[in-house]
Image: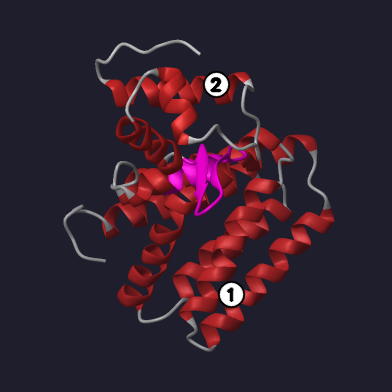
Amino acid sequence: MKKLVKTNLTDQIFNYIQEEIIKGTWKPGEKLPSENELSESLGVSRMSLRSAIQRCSAMGLTETRVGEGTFVRSFNLRSYFSELYRMKLLGRDPNEINDLRCVLQIASARLAIADGIAESDLQVLVDLEKDMEEAAGRNDMDAFHDADIQFHRAVCELCQNELLFMIYDAVESLMDDVTRQNVERSVRSTSNFDLVLSHHREMLESLQDRDMERFTKAQMDSRERSLRYYASSQQEP
């Protein structure tokens, strides 16, 4: 291992560990050398090394198990974005998050309509829309939210594009809280779930009809409502 110049040392150690993981020197599931071994081979203090490893863990590259050591994690974009969201470094503007979901769903629907949508996939949406109606009838916000999240997730699975869905899956943690806020604000403004349910039915029916123009309009109408809900980013949910 190369010796490191002691300038911005924690950054250098972090970059080194990251590069070695990317190169495959340490593979997912493998244990990193001990702190003593690493600090000695790199010529750095254990304190600097520990700070770098903590950063690796925060970014989802590694995990430290008490009494066992530090292990390489399987790379997961979801954990990466979740950590950025938790640290309030990403996803602070609800309108940007709503726009992101809008873009991903329109792209997924366009691809799915062009390539063909399986009836079995549409049935998943039918069932989830029914779950939302039943939850709304019980005024069960938690159950409604769960079905709502699954509905939008299923829309982005329609195109059978693994990369697009991987991006959606990665940022779903950003969208989760805002999706619930969208519904809660809509329910407060109308005193019922009717507007939210109408939006989901419009999405579903447009997909059943393979009508991309109608689907896009439903998305843009929802976007306009969201812009009004978050007219000021300083407003409380």
Position above or below: 87 against 20? below
* Magenta segment: 60-82
- From the top left corner, tell me how far across and down residue 231 is, in percent: 22, 53
- From the top left corner, tell me how far across and down residue 209 is, in percent: 72, 52
Image-based side of 95 in relation to 127, left or right: left
Q: State the residue in front, 75 or 186.
A: 75
Residue 89: which disc? none
**Residue 102 in view of the camera:** no
**Alpha carbon of mark 1 to alpha carbon of mark 2: how far?**
47 Å
Q: What secondary structure is marked by label 2?
A: helix
Callout 2 amino acid: Glu
- Give yes or no for residue 178 being in the magenta stretch: no
Residue 132: which disc? 1
- From the top left corner, tell me how far across and down residue 222 is, in percent: 43, 55
Q: State the residue in front, 111 or 17.
A: 17
Q: What secondary structure is marked by label 1?
A: helix
> Which of the two discs, 1 and 2, sits closer to the camera?
2
Residue 204 falls in image quadrant = bottom right
Q: Which residue is mark 2?
A: 20
